[in-house]
Amino acid sequence: MLKKAGQMLMYVCILFVSVCAYDDFHINRESNKEMIEQGKAQYQLLKERGSLPRYGDCWKRAVEHVNDGCRHLSEDTQSDIALHITNCFLEMSGHETYNCELDKKPNLRGICINSMSDRAFNVYTEFYTHTQNICWFLRGQIWHETISENTFKVGKQLEVSSKTQQQLLKTQQESLELQEKMLKHGKFLEAVLEDLYISVRAHQELLNVMSESLSRLQTWIVGEISWIDSIIFYISAILFILLLTSTKRTSESRLTLFLLVFLNFASERFLCVFVRYFYSEPNIDVFYIHIYNSVWYLRYCMVFLSVVVFAYKFYHHKDLTEQNNDLLRKLSKKNDNILEMLSNIKNKLNKSDVDFEIESESKNKSFIKEYRYSYENNLSNGSTPVLNNTNYFNKSDIKENLVKYSNILPAKHKFPLNEISNGRYNLRSRHGTPESNQSSQ
């Protein structure tokens, strides 16, 4: 629409400029009416002479020269046209011609004109004036034709523009009707939007309540999921610990591992409560992943500490039962050595001493049985058995019998019996020895 209006305005401006130019030319033409009339007569004469059978070609070329030269009229062009017409006239009248218009240089043309005869120069001067009149006439014709053509074009464009303006007016009327309808619909839509706004506010409040309830539900679900996961993990951990610590070598680490499991369970519960109340995350998936990762970091730490404790207890284990059994075996071996020595002593004694030897042996065996029974009772009660052979050697009857029969032992079988009973004997004295008894006999 704007483009067509701009084109119409441009055509109106062109028409205005053309009319102004025509008026200006018309005013000048009125002031030079006589010149134009003469030019018209001379131009008609040239055209009539162009139809002559013998000299028509020269006059036709002269007319073409006039038509072309008058479009850009200057002194040189006017001189060329006058010379061309002069040659045609001189040729037609049977006089000598001068082709001065062919000399384009001004000095050569001036020399050529000066060389003309008086009759030829007078003809040239007359046609020089006629050329100006003819050009004035042709310019008026050209302007008139141009203005007529432009006026016709502008009229056509104005007609088209008028139709366009009518269509535009019709379109504007339709647009006004549509705007009125849109205004009515806008008012109706405003009322609908107001109702919708009230409804949205109500729904928003309802959604806030539902969102809060959903958030609580999500929190509860996360807590329950974490509880179920914790129960499964810790039951599995307890069963695994019981399985690993079922041997004597690893049983000492059981209590420490259970303590680590309990501490990690308490840390997980505290972490879940802390994150649930102090970590705001609307997305339940992100929230659960955050809790899940944090809980498993704690579990990895617990597993690492449990492995360290288990390895330490495993490599630094001391089996007290095995140590006491070794000690008992050593004690039994010593008792067997003592019994062997007593058996050798018995063989060296007299027949009357057999009862003493048998009695000593039976007492030794009864002491060993009694000590073993006491050691097993201490182990069953959980106390550490203490090996002490002092009571065995401090028996008064065994000590008296050993002292009684020590005097009859041979010298080669003499051994420090008092040392066995944690006592002392005199190596310097030979009293009570078999050698001293024989010498006394």
Image: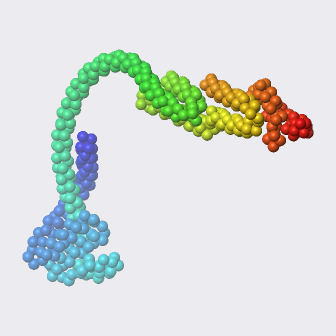
Residue 201, percent from left and from top: 36, 18
Compared across the picture, whether 423 is left or right of 374 comes to right
User: Which quadrant holds the N terminus?
Assistant: top left
x%, y% of residue 380? 61, 25
Quadrant containing the C terminus is: top right
User: What residue is drawn where x is 17% and y is 66%?
Assistant: 42
Q: Which residue is drawn at 20% across and 55% down?
A: 146
Residue 68: x and y, percent? 22, 67
* Residue 31, placed above or below residue 65: above
Quarter residue 203 falls in: top left
Q: 138 left or right of 435?
A: left
Residue at x-position 47% and y-position 27%:
235
**Residue visible at 9% across and 71% down in the picture:** 51
**View extreme (front): residue:** 441
Q: Nearer the viewer, residue 145 or 8?
A: 8
Q: Is residue 135 above or below residue 316?
A: below
